[in-house]
Image (cartoon, rainbow, N blue to C red):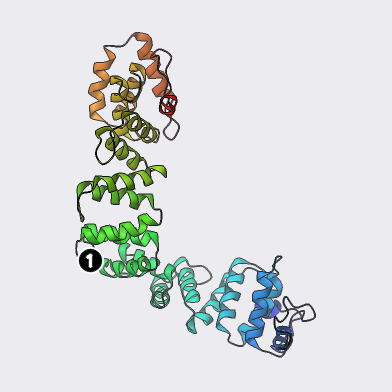
Amino acid sequence: MLLTALLLSGHLSAHAGPDSAQPCASSPNPSASPPSANADQGDADAQFALAQACLSEARPDPARAARWLRLAAQQGHAKAQLALGILTAEGRGVLQHQAEAADWLRRAATQGEPEAQYRLGLMLANGEGVAQDLAEAIRWYSAAATQGWLDAQLSLGNLYFMGLAVRQNFELSAHWFGMAASQGNVNAQERMAAFYEEGNGVPRDRTQAAVWLRRAAEQGSNAAQTRLAQLYELGLGQPRDLAQAAHWYSRAADQGNRDAQFALGLLHESGQGIPQDAAKAAYWFHRSASEGHGPALTRLGLLYRDGRGVDADPVLAQMCFLLATSLGESRSLKEKAMLAGQMTSRQREEAQALAAAWQPGTVLPDASRTGQQRSLWSRLRQ
């Protein structure tokens, strides 16, 4: 049997410690029996403690840890069985063997170890070391999730949402995502907000949606920050508050969310919720447009055309209109045609060359040769 072959001599028992002359740790209490001595005498808790010490040293020794874990696991120590299952699955300190790993995890799972239950469910779901069995995977996920294991709650939420191996059930999906969200998981909080906005699995309630969005936003989710800002801007689920909308758009925009950057540019352009500032509007439109945001390209083109917040530059304006048109912006199609008639042939050629050379995700050109445009960034620094 592989387990026996992996023992040090092939004849170790629970009363003979591996390399006991060189334990991984000594007792912190001089009056207490050294853990290695207790482990040599067959104390499963001491054996597990020594294994933990072997893994937590500056230079971890997973091979010795695995040997101590095996002795404890063979005595039925659930946490040792879990840890040995993980090492065996990863091939750390022992030969990698998925079936052997699943066996140890099953032993620990049967004793109620939630992490073992989740990991066994994952192996069953993926067919790793065991025959794929989604129904049994869900049973183990449920056992772990009921004990509060976060990853199991998320897995069940997704399975019930998508209807994989179970009948699609938004109520159960919302239940498990709600449990995960209450533990502070950002993805689950965002999912709960969507459930409340759409009325999936829970009554439609934008006020409750805003509660979950705020929790996720406060943890730094730029998607939640953007959606929360939209609710404030539109007065959905809470009183309309453009200052709060600007606050959350700003936090998301600083993280690179292009929708938030565009929305923040609109607020700066109109002076809603924040002081009107065309230069800052141009800055945020430029940031968003550089990520391929069609409406931002159109708005930036209009600023370049009219010289608001930036020096007027028909070349850069036309470049923006050309790019926005390629993204399906109908307004830019009209603006592009009108502006082309007011440009020289050299300006039209440069605008087309700039548009052709630009790739989404790269900084959009903010200066031209024939349009006499100063850098947008230098203008903002003044």
Q: Up-down: is 85 above or below 315?
A: below
| Label 1 Cα crowd, 10 Å radius (few <14 / some 14-19 / many 20+) | some
Q: Up-down: is 60 above or below 360?
A: below
Q: Nearer the viewer, residue 60 or 379?
A: 379
Is residue 57 shown left or right of residue 368? right
Q: Residue at x 31, y 29 (%)?
A: 278
Q: Is residue 94 visible?
A: no
Q: In the structure shown, which secondary structural element does the residue marked by tag 1 occupy?
A: loop
Q: Position of residue 139 (x, y in %)?
A: 39, 76
Q: Is residue 240 visible?
A: yes
Q: Residue at x 56, y 80 (%)?
A: 79
Q: Which quarter of the figure is the N terminus placed in?
A: bottom right
Q: Nearer the viewer, residue 130 or 161?
A: 161
Q: Nearer the viewer, residue 340 or 7?
A: 340
Q: Residue at x 25, y 24 (%)?
A: 333
Q: Amino acid at mark 1?
A: Val
Q: On the image, which quarter does residue 20 sit in? A: bottom right
Q: Position of residue 47 (x, y in %)?
A: 66, 83
Q: Residue at x 44, y 31 (%)?
A: 363
Q: Up-down: is 227 above or below 172?
A: above
Label count reads: 1
Q: On the image, which quarter does residue 313 sit in? A: top left
Q: Up-down: is 365 above or below 78?
A: above
The residue tagged 1 is: 202
Q: Position of residue 41 (x, y in %)?
A: 71, 90
Q: Which quarter of the figure is the C terminus placed in?
A: top left
Q: Position of residue 237 (x, y in %)?
A: 20, 56
Furthest residue toward right: 21
Q: On the image, which quarter does residue 34 sit in? A: bottom right
